[in-house]
Image (cartoon, rainbow, N blue to C red):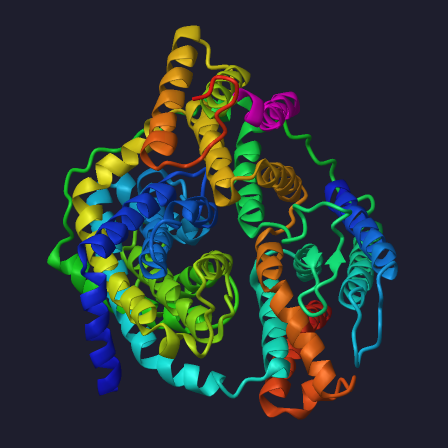
Amino acid sequence: MFESIQHLLSGFTIATTAQNLLYCLVGAIVGTIIGVLPGIGPIAGIALLIPATFGVNATSAIIMLAGIYYGAMYGGSTTSILLNVPGETASVITCIDGYQMAQKGRAGPALAICAIGSFIAGSLGILGLVFLAPPLAEAALAFGPPEYFSLMVFGFIVLSNVTGGSLLKSLMMAVVGLIIGTIGLDPVTGDARFTFGSVSLLGGIEFVAVAIGLFGIGEVLINVHQPQELLDQKVLVPRLRELYPSLQDLRRSIGAILRGTGIGFGVGLVPGPAPVIATYASYMTERRISKHPEMFGKGAIEGVAGPESANNSACQAAFIPLFVLGIPFAPPTAILLGALLIHGVTPGPMLIGQHPELFWGVIASMYIGNFILLVLNLPFVPLFANILRIPKRMLLPLIILFCITGMFTVNNSVFDIWMMLVFGALGFLMRKWAYEGAPLLLALVLGPKLEVAFRQSLMISHGDFGIFFGRPVSLAFLAGTIVFLLFPLVRLAFQKRKKGGE
Amino acid sequence: MNRDEALGGVVLFFFGVVTVLLSLRMPIGTFRAAGTGLFPLCLGILLMVLSAAFLWGLRSKAKKDKGSREARPEEAGSTGQMIFFLGAMVLATAFFNTLGYPLTSFLLLLALLRILRVRSWKVTLALSFLTAVASYFLFVQWLQIPLPKGFLGL
């Protein structure tokens, strides 16, 4: 424990260098803007800015990109409260009571409690990361290919189960992502697969093109396809009369903040879109235990404090599987994994030992980043909200230009722009047909790892599938997978029985 | 049956079929010593099974709901505008190297703003020009990103 504190202190010396502070600040500001803009989320935002980090070392790069991730969580809540427009999915729940508070002239306290709650949750989340990551990394050293394979399968099934849509549709998307991930050179034999003679495809499909295409271009096309009157919708930003919460507000919120932090951290450790689930879970908990549940939906401050704390804490916790196992459980951390690989850092159990400056520097910077966001968000909220006054008709072409420029700079390749456009069109169709993009992106990033783990396991066992069931950790993950697969069926049967009984 | 969802299911089923057919052209090997095509072959088959199960589920649901369903209202989206928008991006990509970054970005913005019916020509021209100039100075001059120079040599 003392060792962790010592390492964290050394992390602070890395994070507080002028360069890293600047990158942290840039990440926090860009993240907040991305969170405010409805057309672009943290996934496309991080992907777009990866090329901007090519000239710096891996630690500074990840400090900035991580800043975008948690900055977007902050920014998303601003538009939810002021305009009832969630900047990203994790802020949907904040709309319910946050917007009601704004309607009653209490936008200031709602925004302030978001910032304070997020700061407390982020800080406690980081403490969890500091104390939990090193022992978990040590335990993960015992993982072999079968354990990794089962863990990734477990991750896909859980993610597919919780993304909100149909399990089958999410699973199909994950399999499509895995198939796309096989394009390029075979990771074991080095033979070309599905390249059709194209040299550009030998390196595989660029995941940044898929991320910007599905989540950036696809989102813009959905906006362009909207009826004309929606493109003209005027955004009215309310005036902030009072900015700071009263003592009573703080007293009512503190419990919700602490409970939200706990829920968020727990949810962040398991696969899935952690911030989204954490906000729902926190809101439900607050409503259930409240002495005045009837106030929820009418501007209860606990309904803002809890979910906002939960989503920030979940963000911090989501870094544990990424850093410790090298397996991202959600699309934004999948993009961060890609960024780490681009910078020549392979996350996994050895990361803390091999790159202590990166691990502890990034953790310390998150703490500083949370403080920057707290300072930044309160006085500059009206400024960020004013970004929304830019008409969509003008904003969407600018986003497209930024996407094309950003995509080209990854590999200086026009081929990547073509890929991005193809996946943009696909993203549009997927949204129209109600198919989720998150499982596809995650599967694309994890695909090669999954294949290598699968093939190595079978090589070790001489083709015997029993290897996945014969090792306790692998068996536990597979048992969990089966439970999650059967869960919807059991629930359906239970509902049918209940209906029959009635 | 939701037509959009069903169409997606059919497309995915055929994607699975194509994956299987292409995988069979590669060495398959055995589970003990897997060939290049084994993993995608398994994935193709899995996708076919999943999409077939999905389509079957939709069919059963449609049978159950028959008669009780109301017609789904058509969305009043602007498909033509969306296709033109995508088309402008395709053209910009096709001529990116020839025209160079500053000219492509100017023309692309001009086209996109007109497609989105920004009424005033003055606003459209000014916004396209200023953004193209600003992004040129930001990316090419300041960040030194080697973007295509095109025939203008900028």
Helix, strand or loop for the magenta stretch, by majority: helix
From the viewer's side, name the closer residue of A41 and A209. A209
From the viewer's side, name the closer residue of A398 and A387. A398
Furthest residue in direction left, as rendered: A247
Q: Position of residue A218 (x, y in %)?
A: 57, 39
**Relative height, residue A288 to residue A240 (above, below):** below
The image quarter containing residue A58 is bottom left
Furthest residue in direction top, as rendered: B121
**Relative height, residue A77 to residue A181 (above, below):** above
Q: Position of residue A440 (x, y in %)?
A: 62, 55
From the viewer's side, name the closer residue of B28 and A74. B28
Q: Is residue A394 visible?
A: yes
| Image quarter (top left, top right, bottom left or bottom right) of the N terminus of chain A | bottom left
In magenta, the rendered stretch is B78-99
**Relative height, residue A444 to residue B33 (above, below):** above
B102 left or right, relative to A293: right
| Image quarter (top left, top right, bottom left or bottom right) of the C terminus of chain A | bottom right
Instruction: Say which residue appears at 57% left-offset and 42% top-offset.
Output: A213
Instruction: Say which residue appears at 23% left-offset and 41% top-offset.
Output: A381
The image quarter containing residue A193 is bottom right
Q: Position of residue A40 (x, y in %)?
A: 45, 41
Q: Is residue B95 magenta?
A: yes
